Image (cartoon, helix red, strand yellow):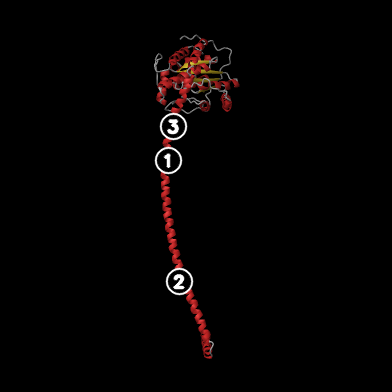
Amino acid sequence: MSIANPPAHHGAAPVALAIVTGMHRAGTSAIARALAVLGFDLGPRLMSADPRMNARGFFEDIDVVALDDALLAHFGADWKSIALLADADFADPALATQARAARELLSARLAPTGRFACKDPRLPRVLPFWQAAIRDLGIAEGYVIAVRHPGAVIASLAARDGLDARRSAWLWLIHVASSLAATHGRPRVVVDYDRLLAAPECELARVAAAFGLAAPAPDDPALVEFRDHFLSAELRHAHVASETVDPAWPPLVADAHALTVALAAAPGAVATNADAAIADLWDRLRAWAPLLAYAGALERAADDVPRLAGELAWAKTAVAQAQGYAADLEAHLAAKEADLVAVRAHTRESSDAAAVHAQNLSAALDQAQGELAATRRALGTLGATRTGRGLLRWLGRGRSHER
């Protein structure tokens, strides 16, 4: 396929907002970093690098990613869903909060320098949403569409995420076709990842031409640092010859790949005579939309199986632990009940002994009271006679002498 040279970027305002779109593992991170050479600010809230995936950084704004994830979830999808979302209503009033957040986010990111670059591989699926916010703010935007051989992307996703090759092929196709279709009539340039690694100066010159900016000079310190220190062959973990086509891929993948190869070789922005080929690719892909929506729903259900299995295993462990705790508690309660029975028995024995002792004391008291009464009667009888009264007086005097 031959793509004619595009018209030069004249008259339009230079791009203030550069949006990097494309498939996961297609070089979007490196391309986003390249835009810093052209003076684009990447923002203050970038996702941290991951030595296992992107050791040099993802260059993704975490707030943009959060919004994109929320948008995909709203439509029952996620980053690896092959649902096309071609008919998604991004103007749904239920998304009013997200739309306001998008406008505020873009305004905040553009405020410091007036030039901001935004990258997230989820963007091709939700570009109409962001374009509405861009239109409301009156921002001059441009797009860099990152492309890479589908075989290399598929191999990278298999190594990183264990995704089935057929699923990854559909994802590649959907991201590429969505990016091209959604950027119709806007400044855009297709950048091939392998071309960027081989000749970064040329690719940056193509982007600059598409965005109405000056290309960096060969000795520009920012370009030198990017070319000689950031870029490295180590960034490319898989390389596939351009003509390689796997018969297991969907038939549209080969056509889309041929189209991107031609677009990436064009000197500047995507040529106007490529629009027909892009529209045809998008129409043919849309014909698959019902089947892709069904497959996407099945994928989400299948993706939930490991999570549900993990939750079930956790629940089983929690139940076993709860049962063990209940058994221990029952044993503890049984021991306490036995202790209570023993205490009650001891209390009864003590109570019985106390009752016997009380009865003995009562009997002794009764006996003493009886003896006292008998003594008083005897004294009364003795005092009734003259002899007895004399004896009592004599006894009384003897006691007083003793005192």
Specify few, some or many for label 3: CA neighbours under 10 Å numbering under 14, 14-19, or 20 or more.
Answer: few
Q: Residue at x 44, y 66 (%)?
A: 353
Counting residues from the start of the chain, the first of labels 1 and 3 encountered is 3
Specify few, some or many for label 1: CA neighbours under 10 Å numbering under 14, 14-19, or 20 or more.
Answer: few
User: What is the distance, in whole Å, between disc 1 and disc 2 at their CAs?
Assistant: 61 Å
Position of residue 376 measured from the top left corner of the image (x, y, whole percent): 52, 82
Q: Nearer the viewer, residue 323 or 45?
A: 323
Question: From the viewer's perspective, is residue 335 above or below residue 151?
Answer: below
Question: Left of 25 or right of it: where is 39?
Answer: right
Which residue corresponds to mark 3?
307
User: What is the distance, in whole Å, between disc 1 and disc 3 at their CAs?
Assistant: 18 Å
Q: Amino acid at mark 2?
A: Asn
Question: From the viewer's perspective, is residue 15 above or below residue 74?
Answer: above
Given this view, does label 1 or label 2 mark the residue nearer the observer?
A: 2
Q: Nearer the viewer, residue 36 or 173?
A: 173
Counting residues from the start of the chain, the first of labels 2 and 3 encountered is 3
Position of residue 400 measured from the top left corner of the image (x, y, whole percent): 53, 85
- Residue 143: in sight, yes or no? yes
- Residue 214: in sight, yes or no? no
Specify few, some or many for label 2: CA neighbours under 10 Å numbering under 14, 14-19, or 20 or more.
Answer: few
Dot 2 falls on a residue whose secondary structure is helix
Dot 3 falls on a residue whose secondary structure is helix
Q: Amino acid at mark 3?
A: Arg
Which residue corresponds to mark 1?
319
Dot 1 falls on a residue whose secondary structure is helix
Counting residues from the start of the chain, the first of labels 1 and 2 encountered is 1
Q: Nearer the viewer, residue 318 or 108?
A: 318
Q: Assess whether mark 3 and mark 1 are in contact (beta carbons under 8 angstroms).
A: no
Which residue corresponds to mark 2?
360
**Based on the displayed image, in which of its 4 quarters is residue 93 positioned?**
top right
Given this view, does label 2 or label 3 mark the residue nearer the observer?
A: 2
